[in-house]
Image: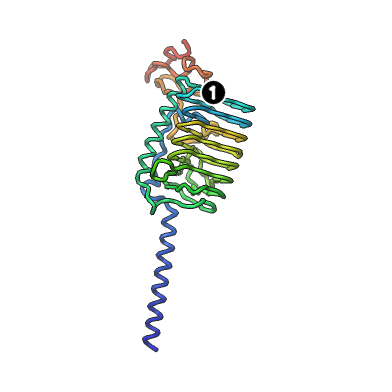
Amino acid sequence: MKHLMVQTNTSTRFTVRVAIIALFAAVLFLLPFDAARAATAAPNLGSAGSFAVLAGTAVTCTDSTVTGDVGVYPGTSVTQTNCTIDGTVHAGNGVAQQAYLDFISAYDSLALLNNTCDLAHTLTGTLAGVTLLPGVYCVDEVAKTGTLTLDAQGDANAIWIFLVSDGVGTGALTGTNFNVVMINGGEPCNVYWWVEAAATLTTSNFLGTILAGAAITVTGGTFNGDALAKAAVTLTGATVTACEATGHGNSGRGKCNQGVGNGPENCDPGNSNQGDPSRSNDELGGTPGNPGRKGGNGK
């Protein structure tokens, strides 16, 4: 009898230990894959951060509303069919070129983080019902649906970076009825989705900026962030609101100082140039301590 009791107690302790290990593993799975990266800086979007939509080949907007600038480079095609764009369209011009180069730079910088993703540190499944704290997360290709909650825990500067990859260059983000919501004081513009290939969202309510290695397609629903793609961007029955238009964001986005005497900042406060860089109210050629337009807008 004593032997039986010892054996039973040993078995119970083993079962408890297994349960604790399993619980600990589950908790780790939902945490950023590297604690040091939880406080990582946002990618620097440069001038690309002022665009609601930026494509490498073409933009097609049908039955949609876009709040923010729209650009394409090196392509030049912007097709609008019952499409309202509350912003400036830059089709193949110098402004679009610089924004595209800035986007590529940000995309490449995030790609370096993706090199550390592995199966043990990758979020799998639809993400429905999952709540995530700020940090860097690797995400698999499984189609997303349901509601993903991002908990800022009262930190308005909290940043999330999602890396969508399959490891062979074709990792895609696909979402249908996929809703991303934020709680406890976060900013949607502090959310970044690096996608190895294409991103396709259907009747979803999405938060964050997508940096896609191929095309972005949004059909129905809302998109609160910037859609930046190496290939085409296609909008159908969607509402897109740029981060800059919301009045929120972080240090990863280009800022404009509208004062004088602090030199050129490669930005256009208030969109004052009406799409023509030569009309910018940025102080072309100005230097600190030497106020004045220095040729900006011909003055």
The image quadrant of residue 168 is: top left
Which residue matches tag 1? 89
Amino acid tagged 1: Val
> On the rendered image, what quadrant is the N terminus found in?
bottom left
Image quarter of residue 74:
top left
Q: Position of residue 165 (x, y in %)?
A: 42, 44
At x 49% / y 52%, what residue is drawn?
125
Residue 207 drawn at (x, y percent): 53, 41
**Residue 34 picture location, percent across and down:** 37, 49
Residue depicted at x 55% and y 34%: 246
Residue drawn where x is 41% and y is 60% of the image:
25
Q: Residues within 10 Å of mark 1 (few under 14, many from 20)?
A: many
> Residue at the bottom extreme?
1
How did the renderer colour the structure? rainbow
Q: How many marks?
A: 1
Determine whether 85 is above or below 13 in the image. Answer: above
**Residue 5 against residue 82 in the figure, above or below:** below
Q: Nearer the viewer, residue 124 or 224?
A: 124
Q: Position of residue 154 (x, y in %)?
A: 50, 47
Q: Quadrant of residue 39?
A: top left
The residue lying toward the viewer, choosing from 202 and 131, is: 202
Identity of the residue furthest to the top in this view: 298
Residue at 54% of width from left, 36% of height from top? 217
Residue 231 appears in the figure: yes
